[in-house]
Image (tube, grey):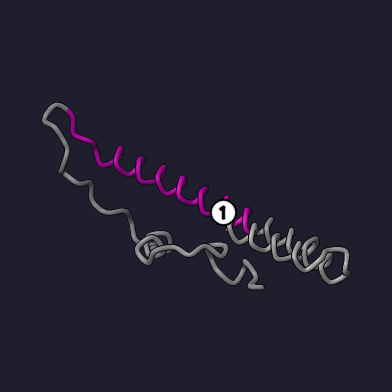
Amino acid sequence: MTAVGDNPFGGLTLPPSVKEMLLSTSPPVSPPSVGKTEEYKETDEEFKKRERMRAKVIEEIVETERKYLDDINILLDCYVVPLQKSGLMMDIQYADAMVSIEIMI
C-alpha cells in the first residue's frame, strides 16, 4: 500500500493544470476584464482577496481529501488486513471489503 505522505496531494490524482496551480509560487494572474460592466469594475485588491479565498477553499478541499485517505488507510491497516490475516474474515468478506473501499476511493 502506498503511503499517503509520498504524494503532496495526499494520494489524490489531480489534473496537471490543478497541480501546477496548487504548487505555483507565482502571484495570481491579472484580473480579467471579461465580464466586467461599466457600472462595476473589480479593483485589484478585490480580485486579490477573491483569489486568496479561492486558494484557501482549494487548500481545504485537498486537506479534507488527504485526511479521508488517511482514514481509509487506517481502516485497511488496522482492521481489514489484520482480520483477514488472522482468519477471522473469510476471503469473500475480504474481497467485498476491498471492493467497497475501492469504490469509496
Q: Nearer the viewer, residue 62 or 42?
A: 62
Q: Which residues are magenta?
A: 40-69
Is 76 placed left or right of 58 in the picture? Answer: right
Q: Quadrant of residue 8?
A: bottom right
* Residue 87: x %, y % from top left: 87, 69
Neighbours of disc 1 within 10 Å: few (<14), some (14-19), many (20+): some
Q: Residue at x 40, y 45 (%)?
A: 54
The quarter of the rendered structure image containing the N terminus is: bottom right
* Residue 72: x %, y % from top left: 67, 58
- Picture layout, residue 65 above or below residue 4: above
Q: Residue at x 17, y 38 (%)?
A: 35
Identify residue for label 1.
Answer: 65
* Residue 59: x %, y % from top left: 49, 51
Q: Residue at x 81, y 68 (%)?
A: 84
Q: Nearer the viewer, residue 25 or 58?
A: 58
Judged by its main secondary structure, the magenta piece is helix
**Which amino acid type corresponds to the residue marked 1 in the rendered image?**
Glu
Q: Nearer the viewer, residue 66 or 34?
A: 66
SS for tag 1? Answer: helix
Is 27 placed left or right of 34 in the picture? Answer: right
- Picture layout, residue 90 above or below residue 54: below
Is residue 58 inside the magenta stretch?
yes
* Residue 77: x %, y % from top left: 76, 65
The quarter of the rendered structure image containing the C terminus is: bottom right
Q: Residue at x 69, y 61 (%)?
A: 96
